[in-house]
Image (cartoon, grey):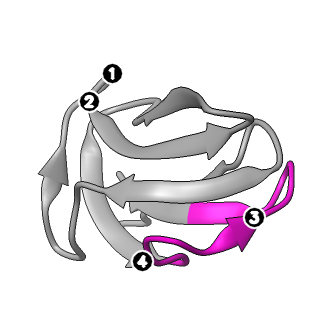
Amino acid sequence: MQDTLEITRVTAPMAGVVARVMAVVGQVVMAGQEICVLESVKLEVPVRAPHTGVLAEVCVESEEDVHGGQPLFVIAQ
């Protein structure tokens, strides 16, 4: 029997600028944990982990412009 990992891509809910990234590759993140903050028109919007898992990839950096739907993180479960 082979174990398989479930991969979830966390995407930007809107266009904006990555204000802060608060997680690193290899870190265990919990469901609901804030992993970054996007800023758009002076409004800060937290991006939270949808489920518990290990952060497999960080696709953005602080101060990077992003568009809605753009991948921000990959979480393995």
Instruction: Look at 84% across and 51% down and name the residue there.
Output: 69
Q: Of label 4 and label 1, which has the lower sequence position?
A: 1
Q: Distance between the residues labelled 2 and 1?
A: 4 Å
Going by the numbered disc 1, the residue's amino acid type is Gly
Q: Residue 3, located in which quarter of the rendered image? A: bottom left
Residue 32 is tagged as 1
Residues rendered magenta in the picture:
59-72
Comparing marks 2 and 3, which lies closer to the viewer?
3
Label pair 2/1, CB-CB below 8 angstroms: yes
State the image coordinates of residue 19 (x, y, percent, origin top left). 45, 54
Callout 3: helix, strand or loop?
A: strand
The residue singled out by tag 4 in the image is 57
Q: Is residue 44 above or below residue 12?
A: above
Q: Badge 3 local density, few (<14 within 10 Å), some, or many (20+)?
A: many
The residue singled out by tag 3 in the image is 66
Callout 4: helix, strand or loop?
A: strand
